Structure formats: structure tokens, C-alpha cells
């Protein structure tokens, strides 16, 4: 069951990644811009790669159901300049993540900030300031 759910999440992320460039590269049409959602969760995977880094984590929704979120941020070069690294997260880390979610309610979005268990705050973007133009 978990493998099937993970497969669906990966497929949704893949479709989102493929479809967004068709609309406008790095457009925010799919995002509920200006809406911020903050969740506490447990990291399942940190993907440090081009063209975007992804944080996957499990967090409970309003009904108490655990959902696996796949949220993106910018490329490793930009994130390094903001203090992030390949080793910023490992599976099992407890985090508090603030994102801009997608409009359709899927567990996908764009990272704004992450607060680590030790209180360190990593800033990815602000809701009112888009990332650098490409």
C-alpha cells in the first residue's frame, strides 16, 4: 500500500514538473500563492539535484491522516547561497515546514522555510518574492 501511495505521489510530482514548463517556466499558476501552510513532520527523503531540490516528509493533515508531502525549492547553487546543503536533512529528522501549497489540495508545494529540531531556520523563498528569473 505504501509503495503504491509513494508511486502516486511521484507520478503527481512528475506530471507537475512536466506540465509547469508548458505554461511558463517557473510559473506559480499551480500554487495557491500567498497562502502559507505550516506543518510539523518527519523527513523521508531530501533530494539535492538540478533543476530543483525536493524535500519529502510525512505530516498529519487536519483529519489526523499521515500524508507524504513532496515539496520543492530552487536549485542546489541558489540553496547553497542561502545556507542549505546536501546534508541539511536526513530521513527521520523532525522538521517544521512552511510551504505554499498547490491549489488542488495534493500534498505538493513550494518550500518557504524549514525549522530544524535544533531551532535553526532555513529560508528558501518568501511567499511574496518569487525565485530568480530563469
Image (cartoon, helix red, strand yellow):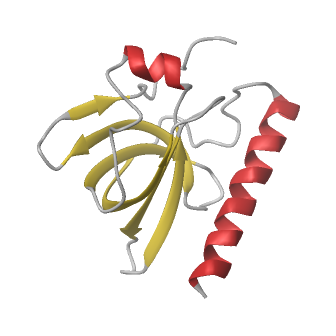
Q: Is residue 36 visible?
A: no
Q: Based on the displayed image, in which of its 4 quarters is residue 17 positioned? A: top right
Q: Is residue 123 above or below residue 31?
A: above
The one of 55 and 19 positioned closer to us in this rendering: 55
Position above or below: 94 against 111: below
In the picture shown, does residue 50 fall above or below 12?
A: above
Quadrant the C terminus occupies = top right
Please give the name of the residue rendered at 34% of the width and 52% of the height, measured from the top-left corner: 90
Question: Farthest front residue?
Answer: 87
Q: Is residue 15 left or right of residue 77?
A: right
Rendered location of residue 33, percent (x, y) = 54, 36
Residue 13 coordinates in the image, percent (x, y): 69, 53
* x, y percent for residue 97: 34, 48
Residue 19: name its quadrant.
Answer: top right
Q: Looking at the picture, does residue 110 appear above or below residue 131?
A: below
Horizontal side of 100 relative to 112 (left or right) equals right
* Residue located 49% across and 17% down the image: 78
Res 126 seen here: yes
Q: Residue at x 57, y 12 (%)?
A: 132
Residue in view at x 16 percent, y 50 percent: 117
Q: Residue furthest left?
A: 118
Toward the right, the furthest residue is 22
**Residue 20, x across and y down, in percent:** 78, 37
Q: Quick one: 67 or 118, which is closer to the camera?
A: 118
Quadrant placement of the N terminus: bottom right
How many numbered marks appear?
0
Amino acid at each position: 500500500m505504501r509503495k503504491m501511495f509513494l508511486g502516486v505521489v511521484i507520478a503527481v510530482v512528475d506530471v507537475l514538473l512536466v506540465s509547469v514548463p508548458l505554461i511558463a517556466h517557473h510559473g506559480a499558476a499551480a500554487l495557491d500563492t500567498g497562502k502559507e501552510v505550516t506543518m510539523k513532520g518527519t523527513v523521508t527523503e531530501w533530494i539535492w539535484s538540478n533543476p530543483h531540490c525536493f524535500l519529502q516528509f510525512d505530516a498529519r493533515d487536519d483529519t489526523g491522516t499521515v500524508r507524504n508531502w513532496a515539496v520543492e525549492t530552487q536549485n542546489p547553487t541558489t540553496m547553497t547561497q542561502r545556507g542549505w546543503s546536501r546534508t541539511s536533512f536526513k530521513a527521520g529528522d523532525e522538521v517544521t515546514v512552511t510551504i505554499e501549497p498547490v491549489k488542488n489540495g495534493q500534498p505538493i508545494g513550494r518550500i518557504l522555510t524549514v525549522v530544524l529540531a535544533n531551532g535553526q531556520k532555513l529560508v528558501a523563498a518568501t511567499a511574496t518574492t518569487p525565485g530568480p528569473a530563469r
